[in-house]
Each structure stands twice: as structure tokens, then as C-alpha cells.
Image (tube, helix red, strand yellow):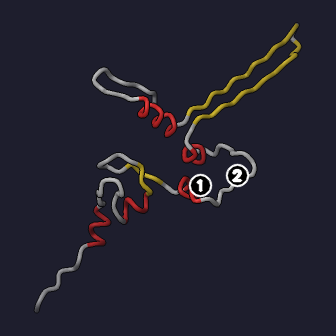
Amino acid sequence: MALQASRDEVTTLADVIDRVLDKGLVINADICVSLAGVELLGIKIRAALASFETAARYGLEFPSGTNYEKSAWKEAAAGRELCPQCRKKVATEVLLNEECPWCGWTSARARKAWAIPEIRAT
């Protein structure tokens, strides 16, 4: 998805940074210096700019010694969905079975689970 904005839409720097971190940005560069067909110098550069969640989703490698047992890594590995009402990312299980912690939106599944069965007198 390209970063595009229309004249009617107000886009702030925070929106652009959020979108870049959500989708990720990778820059690859190969530089080769050769003389008479003989390669004298070769440089390969790969730079990635993404949130940890996006990087983990696409399998980017992290530095050795990274402790994957920290709670932040576990949160990044958990599935996340956009809340239909406030459009913020929430853990899939929370969004389906509970409610959005940001706006209080509840799914049909959660409402059904919370419903108290009607007791009928016979």
C-alpha cells in the first residue's frame, strides 16, 4: 500500500510514522566498484525500518542475545486486529472474547457469551 494523501484528508507526521512502522520499510543497496571488469570493491547494504511486531511477522533477524521471553516480544508474537470502531490494534483474543480496551466495542461472540439465559416459569 503506497503512502498517499488526498487534498481533503489531513495527514500528520504521526500518521505517516505509524503507517511506515506498521507496514515496514526496507532499503537494499548494492554498490560495486570495478576496473576493467574486475570487481575491486563490493558493498551490500540492507536497512529495515519497522516496528518489532512487523519485523517479527516478516521474519527479520534480530541481534544475537535478544531475550525473546520478555513480555513485549510475547505481545508482538500474539495476533492483533483492528477494532472496527476506534481502529486501534488489539489482541485478537481480547477483541473477540472480551471488549476493546480503548473504546469498549464488543463483538457478537462476546455479547452472546455474556448474555444471561432467560429463566421461564412453567
Q: Amino acid at mark 2?
A: Thr
Q: Secondary structure at mark 1?
A: helix
Q: Residue furthest bottom?
A: 122
* Image point (81%, 21%), residue name: 42
* Image point (65%, 56%), residue name: 68
Give the number of the disc on residue 6. Answer: none
Q: Are discs 1 and 2 less than 8 Å apart at CB? A: yes
* Image point (39%, 29%), residue name: 12
Q: How packed is label 1: few (under 14 Cα within 10 Å), some, or many (20 or more)?
A: some
Q: Which residue is mark 1?
A: 73
Q: Where is residue 94 drawn, in percent x and y?
A: 40, 62
Q: How packed is label 2: few (under 14 Cα within 10 Å), some, or many (20 or more)?
A: few
Q: Which residue is mark 2?
A: 66
Q: Amino acid at mark 1?
A: Trp
Q: Residue furthest left?
A: 122
Position of 122 with respect to 62 (left or right) is left
- Does 61 sit above or below residue 13? below
Q: Where is residue 69 drawn, in percent x and y?
A: 64, 60
Q: CA distance from mark 1 to mark 2?
A: 10 Å
Question: Closer to the camera, 47 or 14?
Answer: 14
Q: Quadrant of the N terminus?
A: top left
Q: Where is residue 119 drawn, in percent x and y?
A: 17, 85
Q: Where is residue 67 drawn, in percent x and y?
A: 68, 56
Position of 58 with respect to 63 (left or right) is left
Q: Quadrant of the C terminus?
A: bottom left
Question: Closer to the camera, 106 or 109?
Answer: 106
